[in-house]
Image: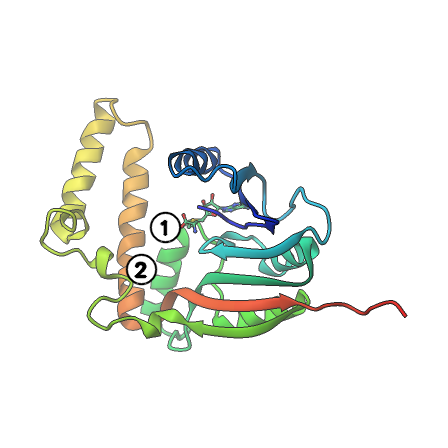
């Protein structure tokens, strides 16, 4: 749930704009006895409440895909990074196999965007270009989905196997969960809107699985970039 982090001495600061995630992170830190090393701050990563050049390193895992303007986000991260600081991340991207002219491909992309509350999902070259326009030099990048064991691709849990833990992701399991949520909402045990959320998440799960199977979408486009050292004053 950490959107970005800072390593300053031995401390890490996690940023998230969601109260629940902040609370959950703090609880997990306490349980793991890590609170003295890692803290959380509620903030919008588009406008960070930190001074320029105050971070030794930044990382983001499946979080920057939520940015309404990725170029502006990378520029904001570069602002708070010290010269020479590193930035590594995992980005949700459409792959080179994606064809905008293909109706099914477009429907899958839309399903992932709507179901996961994402703005336009970018291609990998698009992300690299945005990093570079923010003054970050890309040292390494690749789609880590291609490194996965073909027997257990990243979408395996969404595909649902017949097992106790995998049942909820099978077609029957998804329908059963949905019917249960609808019943709980009508009995006012589940909050209003639970059925609509369930519908959205079912569609998102199906789109992610299909996008993964077709190889048109990856949730793990890895990049490692560095802010330039800047010019030294003579
Ligand atoms: C898909 S989750 C993944 C996060 C994390 N890597 C994890 O494994 O739990 C994306 C996270 O980005 C956070 N997020 C989205 N927009 C944000 C923003 N503008 N500022 C800070 N955090 C944001 C969300 O609250 C969410 O926790």
Vertical position of residue 175 compared to residue 145: above or below: above
Q: CA distance from mark 1 to mark 2?
A: 9 Å
Q: Secondary structure beneath disc 1?
A: helix
Q: Secondary structure beneath disc 2?
A: helix
Point out residue 199 in the picture as x, y percentages from the top left corner.
28, 44
- The answer to whether 214 appears left or right of 62 in the picture is left
Give whichever of 11, 122 is nearer the camera.
11
Q: Residue at x 45, y 40 (%)?
A: 34
> Which disc is residue 25 wearing?
none
Q: Mark 1: is the Cβ under 8 angstroms from ligand 1?
A: no
Q: Residue at x 40, y 51 (%)?
A: 114
Vertical position of residue 23 compared to residue 171: above or below: above
Asked whether the residues under the numbered discs 1 and 2 touch, taking CB atoms below 8 Å apart as contact, a structural biologist would say yes
Q: Residue furthest right?
A: 234
**Residue beneath label 2, please?**
208
| Residue 94 figure quarter | bottom left
Q: Residue at x 24, y 56 (%)?
A: 158
Point out residue 192 in the picture as x, y percentages from the top left corner.
32, 28
- The answer to whether 172 appears left or right of 81 in the picture is left
**Residue beneath label 1, please?**
115
- The answer to whether 26 appears left or right of 190 in the picture is right
Give whichever of 43, 214 is nearer the camera.
43
| Residue 146 figure quarter | bottom left
Q: Residue at x 42, y 37 (%)?
A: 33
Give whichever of 63, 5 is nearer the camera.
5
Decide: few, some or many residues near mark 1? Use Cα within 10 Å; few <14, some 14-19, many ≥20: many
Point out residue 210 in the picture as x, y percentages from the top left corner.
27, 64
In the rendered image, which quarter contains the C terminus?
bottom right
């Amino acid at each position: 749930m950490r959107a970005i982090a800072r390593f300053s001495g031995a401390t890490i600061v996690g940023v998230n704009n969601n109260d629940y995630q902040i609370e959950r992170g703090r609880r997990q830190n306490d349980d793991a006895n890590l609170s003295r090393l890692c803290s959380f701050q509620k903030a919008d990563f588009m406008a960070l409440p930190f001074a320029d050049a105050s971070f030794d390193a930044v990382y983001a895992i499946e979080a920057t895909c939520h940015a309404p303007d990725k170029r502006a986000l990378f520029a904001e991260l570069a602002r708070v990074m010290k010269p020479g600081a590193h930035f590594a991340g995992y980005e949700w991207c459409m792959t080179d196999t994606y064809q905008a002219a293909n109706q099914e491909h477009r429907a899958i992309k839309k399903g992932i965007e709507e179901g996961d509350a994402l703005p336009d999902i970018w291609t990998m070259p698009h992300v690299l270009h945005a990093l570079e326009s923010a003054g970050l030099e890309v040292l390494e990048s690749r789609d880590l989905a291609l490194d996965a064991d073909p027997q257990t691709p990243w979408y395996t849990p969404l595909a649902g196997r017949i097992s106790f833990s995998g049942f909820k992701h099978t077609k029957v399991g998804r329908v059963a969960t949905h019917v249960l949520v609808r019943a709980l909402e009508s009995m006012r045990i589940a909050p209003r809107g639970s059925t609509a959320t369930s519908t959205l998440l079912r569609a998102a799960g199906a789109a992610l699985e299909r996008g993964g199977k077709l190889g048109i979408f990856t949730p793990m486009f890895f990049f490692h970039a560095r802010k330039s050292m800047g010019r030294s004053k003579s």
